[in-house]
């Protein structure tokens, strides 16, 4: 098993099955990529972006990190956004979180895990920001559900506030930022309501989405 032969075998079968349907699929795709969507999601192995959206290779540009964070000093995430928006000209950025997110849970529990605690500070910032609402929720499960959802909307706003997206909107580029959440228990995606296609619509959209989340408890 040193060479992970099982995975290499699965890959052989996968490649063959696609070429059976479309013999030149990989040949054509190797020439260029033109995805319409950028996905910013959690690294969680149970939330595979392409599979849950039913998209094929070439259709989804992907960035994943623990708890789907969009941090204004994270060169990795910012570079992905810039390349996707400026060069690939994606039309949609989808920030997708998920219920049962371990990163959000650990941030709420404030346990010491090591280096990752520094990363999860950003999730704790979301909690502090909404402390007045969250402090009224006594049930731990309900509190977590709010946190999974609030975290997504906050990160979607962070995407909107990047210079990359602001500049794209200024020059009239067609670009919409979405906030979605995925259910591990049913395999379904839900739209959390924040959806912005211009600088002017960010704030109103944000308040509507946050109100919808916090009034649903
Ligand atoms: Co997660």
Image (cartoon, grey):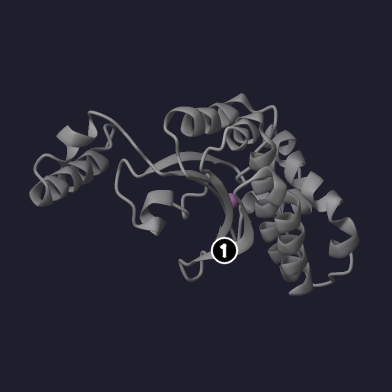
Question: Within the image, what quadrant is residue 113 found in?
Answer: top right
Q: Is residue 154 visible?
A: no
Disc 1 beta carbon < 8 A from ligand 1?
Answer: no
Q: Residue furthest front?
A: 172
Q: Residue 7, relative to residue 192: is it above or below?
A: above
Considering depth in this image, is 107 or 199 the residue closer to the camera? 199
Q: Is residue 75 visible?
A: yes
Residue at point 26%, 42% (across, down):
7
Crowdedness near tag 1: few (<14), some (14–19) or many (≥20) residues, C-alpha within 10 Å:
some
Question: Within the image, what quadrant is residue 132 found in?
Answer: bottom right
Q: For the N terminus, which image quadrant?
A: top left
Give x and y (percent) for residue 32: 28, 30
Give x and y (percent) for residue 178: 57, 53
Count of residue discs: 1
Q: For the C terminus, which image quadrant?
A: bottom right
Judging by the rendered image, the residue that carries numbered circle 1 is 191
Residue at point 73%, 46% (across, down):
123
What element does badge 1 sit on?
strand
Left or right of residue 171, residue 116 in this image: right
Give x and y (percent) for residue 80: 51, 31
Give x and y (percent) for residue 18: 16, 48
Q: Residue 177, relative to residue 165: is it above or below?
A: below
Q: Residue 30, relative to residue 135: is it above or below?
A: above
Question: Within the image, what quadrant is residue 60 found in?
Answer: top left
Considering depth in this image, is 148 or 83 the residue closer to the camera? 83
Left or right of residue 31, residue 181 in this image: right
């Amino acid at each position: 098993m040193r060479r992970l032969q099982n995975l290499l075998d699965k890959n052989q079968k996968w490649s063959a099955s696609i070429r059976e349907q479309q013999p030149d699929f990989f040949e054509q795709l190797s020439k260029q990529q033109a995805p319409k969507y950028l996905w910013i999601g959690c690294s969680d192995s149970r939330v595979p972006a392409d599979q849950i959206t039913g998209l094929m290779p070439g259709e989804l540009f992907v960035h994943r990190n623990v708890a789907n964070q969009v941090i204004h000093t994270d060169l990795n995430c910012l570079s992905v956004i810039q390349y996707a928006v400026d060069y690939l000209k994606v039309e949609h950025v989808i920030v997708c979180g998920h219920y049962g997110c371990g990163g959000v849970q650990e941030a709420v529990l404030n346990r010491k895990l090591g280096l990752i605690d520094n990363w999860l500070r950003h999730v704790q910032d979301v909690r502090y920001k909404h402390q007045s609402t969250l402090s009224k929720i006594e049930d731990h499960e309900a509190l977590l559900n709010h946190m999974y959802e609030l975290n997504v909307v906050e990160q979607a706003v962070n995407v909107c506030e990047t210079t990359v997206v602001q500049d794209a909107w200024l020059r009239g580029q067609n670009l919409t930022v979405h906030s979605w959440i995925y259910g591990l228990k049913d395999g379904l995606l839900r739209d959390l309501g924040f959806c912005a296609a211009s600088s002017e619509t960010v704030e109103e959209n944000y308040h509507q989405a946050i109100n919808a989340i916090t009034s649903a408890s």
